[in-house]
Structure formats: structure tokens, C-alpha cells
Image (tube, grey):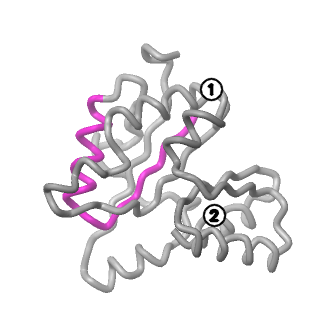
Amino acid sequence: GDGDATWRMAQANPRENYLGVEVHRPGVGRLLLMLERHELENVRVACEDAVAFLEHRVPPASLDGVRIYFPDPWPKKRHHKRRLVNLLFVALLAGKLKVGGILHLATDWLPYAEHMLEVMRDAPDFENLSASGDYCPKPAWRPDTKYERRGERLGHPVRDLVFRRTAGRAG
């Protein structure tokens, strides 16, 4: 995205380190400007495909959390294969997250939220933190995003999915 959520989380939690990974150069540039403007030093940024970055540059069990907010929902059926949240990607995340690490997903596209929930139900290395087994209330740590505000203007309800990495089979 445009990095807004990343710099805001980093500003709110100066003792935590953040890594922003985004392929969209203008979004990376905006994030870098905001980090400089707010004198934030707890963020590293990679302008790279997230899958390739995780595969080649992130050690196993090294992440405390992963936040994926409002990824492209690829709404057309023929494009669903392009969706970031799928079983292969979630398995990759399981290997990079520490046991107990949090995976937080958010979307304003209900069919994608349902898809994410289905994928996560089939992911043996995660437990859903929703008391009802589906969606969670918006956690206090997630700032509003540009895409969220746009979705709300269009009448799209936002869904948050929060999961904890368990020992599962990969741990």
C-alpha cells in the first residue's frame, strides 16, 4: 500500500521493529518520506515481492508477527489465483513466524475475507483468535488505512482475521 499503517504502527511502538515489504514503488517512496518526516528508525523497507522476500531473505522462525492489510482482492474469478493469501503462502508464513507469532489479515472485500477464512481453517499451524471462529473485532494496534476508508465509503464492511502461530506440524 502507501505505508501509512506501517509508519503509524512504528510511531506508536518505538521499541518494536517493523519491516515493510511492498512491490509498488510509489508506496515505498511515500513510506520512506513519512519515516524521515517522523524521524522513525525502527522500520526497514524492502521494495520487493513479498513471497520472494520471505523465501530468500527471512530466516525461519524469526518474525513475531505479520500484518497484511487490504491486499488486492483480485475480485474476478479468473484472477483468484493471484491472491496473496493462499495455502502455499500461509505455509511459507508459518515457517517464518515464531511459535506464538500473530498473523493479522484485514480486508473490506467480503468474498476475499471468506476465502482467507477458508484458507486459514485449512492451515494446521495456526489457531483462530476469534471467539466465534471467524472474524475478530478490529484490534487497537491496526491503524485505519486508505483502502479501508475507501471501502467504508463504498459500504464494504471490514473484516479482521487474527491467528496465532502454533507448534503445528512445521514447528
On screen, residue 114 above or below 88: below
Q: Secondary structure at mark 1?
A: loop
Please say whether residue 114 is one of the residues in the magenta stretch. yes
List x then y, in percent, for residue 8: 66, 69
The image quarter containing residue 41 is bottom right
| Residue at the far bottom in the pictured view | 153
Of the pair 44 and 7, the residue shown nearer to us: 44
The residue shown at (44%, 17%) is 168
Label 2 and label 1: CA atoms lie apart by 21 Å
Q: Identify which amino acid the numbered label 1 is placed on.
A: Ala
Is 82 colored magenta in this rendering? Answer: no
Q: Quadrant of residue 29?
A: bottom right
53 or 162: nearer the viewer: 53
Quarter residue 141 falls in: bottom right
Residue 66 pos. (x, y %): 55, 45
Q: Residue at x 74, y 77 (%)?
A: 33
Q: Which residue is mark 2?
A: 6
Pointer 1 residue: 61
Which mark is drawn over residue 150? none
